[in-house]
Image (cartoon, rainbow, N blue to C red):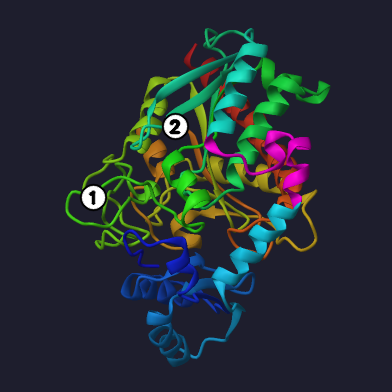
Amino acid sequence: MAVTCNKTLIDIFSDRNSVHNIKVRDKSDQDFLFNLLLELDLDVWNYGEPLRQNASVMVTPENRQKFLEAIDGRNLEHNVHIDDVAKYLEDVDNQHLQRNARDDEKKIFEKYPRHAEVDEYLEYIANQYPAIATIVNAGNSFEGRPMKYLKISTTNFADNTKPIYFMEAMLHAREWATTPVALYSIHRLVENVTTEDQDLLNNIDWIILPIANPDGYEYTHTDQRLWRKTRSINPTSDCIGVDGNRNFDANFNTVGVSQNPCSDVYPGWVAFSEVETRIVRDIMLEYLDRMEIFMDIHSFGSYILFPNGDGTLPPTAPQLHQVGCAMGAAIDTVKLPQAIYYRVANAGQLLYPTSGDSTDYGQIIGIPFPYTLELPNFGGGFIVPEELIEQTNMESWLGIAATARLARIYYRAKLNLNN
């Protein structure tokens, strides 16, 4: 969706945007929708998968006629999924307000906390469990919000025989379901370590960054719920922000992006223009010698995706597929009936071509297992009801644990080979 600068929430509510489901028959239909995204500057919620799940596209009144003419001209089956997005979001907000009285009873990973609440939780964990948890302020976002992460280790990151697992969430601001997964992972590693998960704490070091785009995330709470980008000022346009997951120095600004600074897939004027992506990059580089997994958590689609975004396969594709399949299998054993099974694949081949994304950058600099985890598709798009957070956290943690154990096996084998 083309984002008009300085647009208020009331203005957006009056637009009567709608979401349409489209049945994709083959890869050419996916490619068609991808090209339509760039042509009409659409907001594609889900590119769909042939015979498996429909594509979902949000359109404005201004581009609706051209959109419908285009998909009818291709003879694609479609239907209206959400007639009025603003009304839908208002209904969700009203439901949330009705539950507010019970919010104090919820743990932080059972709801959608604000940035300040997440900071407080990270500080609490570091203060209560200093033997295993260390908080790091990696710097401030564009608007000055601290970007803090936790280092979790029984050996203070001093044991070189332990691999490092780097998990980050909320690179795209509207994907609220991602941060609770990161917070729940902290909870399971520090506050509530079960006997069967003790190995994950003892044998692996963890870095967890719960909010990689704090400015955008706060903006989704105060102004525009479906905002995706950062909130930086563009030196060449009045339009605000950059798609953080197109801003990494990996085949930058080549495919899967728009040159329109108002677009949701605008990559920025230069790689790492955003302080937020530079912070993620610097964490990767600082711990690169032991970083075995980088997990970039997004929502939604029920996918586990690995490089490269342009559809080419790295030499380690078989290993990436194996570890990804272990994750998908662990999640699928406990998924809800209405959620589809996870698909593990190369990102560019399964969905659409991209450039400048974080996992491709991880691959380029030498992280053995970089993944994008797309959380479950429950049918509501980016709006995941709070009552489904517990399920999302639980099943995602099982998948995260599976990848951690397998990656450690690979890491130990590499150490033995080098010794």
Cα gap from disc 1 to disc 2, whole angstroms:
31 Å
Specify the segment rendered in magenta.
99-115
Could you tell me which residue is drawn at 66 percent across and 43 percent down? 327
Q: Are marks 1 and 2 in contact (CB under 8 Å)?
A: no
Quadrant assignment, res 48 = bottom right
Residue under numbered circle 2: 367
Where is 110 relative to 221, above or below?
Answer: above
Residue type, mark 1 in image: Asn
Quadrant assignment, res 159 = top right
Could you tell me which residue is drawn at 57 percent across and 52 percent down? 299
Name the secondary structure under disc 2.
Answer: loop
Where is 206 relative to 210, above or below?
Answer: above
Residue under numbered circle 1: 234
79 or 146, nearer to the observer: 146
Could you tell me which residue is drawn at 59 percent across and 71 percent down? 87
In the displayed structure, does residue 341 sit left or right of residue 138?
Answer: right
Residue 396 image point, x, y percent? 68, 42
In the displayed structure, does residue 296 sit left or right of residue 105?
Answer: left
Classify the position of the N terminus by image quarter.
Answer: bottom left
Residue 37 image point, x, y percent? 38, 71
In the displayed structure, does residue 343 sit left or right of residue 355?
Answer: right
